Image (cartoon, grey):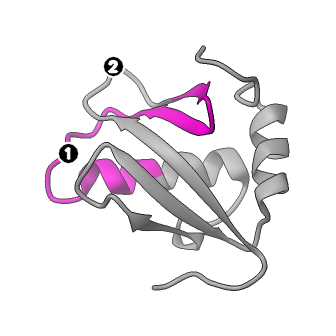
Amino acid sequence: MPISGADAATLRVRVQPRASRHAIVGWADDVLRVAVTAPPVQGAANDALRRLLAAALGVAPSAIAIARGERGRDKVVRIGGITDADVRARLSARGAGGEGTR
């Protein structure tokens, strides 16, 4: 389902599949680094990424779409119903908003 409109944020993400735990690692420049335990097979890592971001941002997993990078580690995701500023604020509130890698 395409996500569009003024109330949709765009987020650059670098995913580490097959990690030991699900985690939002932090920011490296303007890229959010995320670790998921799922393997990059049959979309499992993408589904895990959607669920992790949804929980962190307080939106439904269906509000998150992978706009670019479906089969790579570097992705661009669109998040419906939230602005870019809201994304930064919500991630900051849960400790992942600082600059640099954690």
Viewer-side label of 2, 1? 1
Please give left or right for residue 33 compared with residue 4 in the image.
left
For the C terminus, the image quarter is: top right
Front position in the image: 73 or 54 = 73
Please give left or right for residue 86 compared with residue 35 in the image.
right
Mark 2 or 1 closer to N-term?
A: 2
Residue 28: % across, % down: 58, 26
The kind of residue on which mark 1 rests is Pro
The kind of residue on which mark 2 rests is Ser
Residue under label 1, please give it.
40
- Judged from this view, the residue extending furthest toward the front is 29
* Residue at point 59%, 54% (across, down): 11
Q: Quadrant of residue 86?
A: bottom right
* Residue at point 51%, 60% (across, down): 77
How many marks overall? 2
SS at badge 1: loop
For the N terminus, the image quarter is: bottom left
In magenta stretch: residue 56: no
- Judged from this view, the residue extending furthest toward the top is 102
**Segment colored magenta:** 24-49
SS at badge 2: loop
Residue 10: % across, % down: 62, 62
Q: Is residue 60 above or below residue 14?
A: below
Residue 20: % across, % down: 33, 19
Q: Is residue 76 above or below residue 80?
A: above
Compute the Cα span from label 2 to label 1: 14 Å
Residue under label 2, please give it.
20
Front position in the image: 69 or 34 = 69
